[in-house]
Image (tube, rainbow, N blue to C red):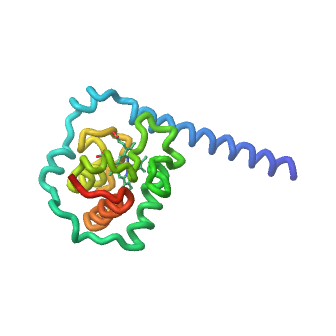
Amino acid sequence: MKTSVTNMKKSCGNLFAAITALAVLAWGIGCGQSREEQATAPPPAQQEAEKVRPRKLESARVTENTRQTYQWYCAQCHGAEGKGDGVNAKFLTVPPRDHTKVAYLETRTDAQLFDAIKFGGLAVGRAPCMPAWGHTLDDDAIRSLVQYIRELCQCEAL
Ligand code: HEC
């Protein structure tokens, strides 16, 4: 009896390792594309992005819900404090952005950040390993995430 339980644990462990390896592999492939390939890929998201360009996002507010959303969906890659050091960061070919980095974020508009979150990295000429969240989060949630990133970097939009 004892041995069979041990065996089961062992095989589940192996299965888990295999799934993890596959997931890592999948991300690797997704992020392994060269910049050229990305540029020539037809980006339907881009056209849609042009239509939905919120200008000023000051009206969006950061709530407890925003912080939780960030921890739930973004922290695995961007880190709990947004420093780009989440647990998945080392498996990505392109490092997740450090959301506390003023020098970079000052060069981006709120609309660019919004598009990156809603439509994914490709929509703003960035890596596809930044996923699109438009099917998961509504526009208000995304606007408040943009504001939250501004809070993390303590910086203003371009
Ligand atoms: C699977 C990992 C992963 C997750 C999860 C993730 N991101 Fe990213 N994100 C990235 C990577 C990688 C980049 C860098 C892309 C690049 O520089 O080409 C990035 C870049 C960004 C950028 C900057 C885009 C730019 O203009 O350079 C923003 C903003 C961003 N992420 C917000 C978020 C938010 C908000 C969430 C949660 C809703 C999130 N990300 C979840 C991987 C991730």
Q: Nearer the viewer, residue 124 or 97?
A: 97
What residue is shown at x 21% (from left), y 64% (from top)? 57
Q: Position of residue 13 (x, y in %)?
A: 69, 45
Residue 68 in which image quadrant: bottom left
Residue 136 in view (yes/no): no
Residue 148 in which image quadrant: bottom left
Q: In the image as oriented, which residue stretches furthest toward the right?
A: 2
What residue is shown at x 13% (from left), y 50% (from top)? 50
Q: Nearer the viewer, residue 129 or 147?
A: 147
Q: Position of residue 34 (x, y in %)?
A: 33, 27
Q: Position of residue 103 (x, y in %)?
A: 32, 46
- The reply, left or right, for residue 140 in relation to residue 29 is left
- The reply, left or right, for residue 87 in relation to residue 3 is left
Q: Position of residue 126 (x, y in %)?
A: 29, 39
Q: Is residue 62 above or below residue 28?
A: below
Q: Count up the numbered dots.
A: 0
What residue is shown at x 24% (from left), y 47% (from top)? 107
What residue is shown at x 16% (from left), y 50% (from top)? 48
Q: Is residue 144 above or below residue 27?
A: below
Residue 156 in which image quadrant: bottom left
Q: Nearer the viewer, residue 7 or 94?
A: 94
Q: Is residue 90 above or below residue 73?
A: above
Residue 61 in view (yes/no): yes
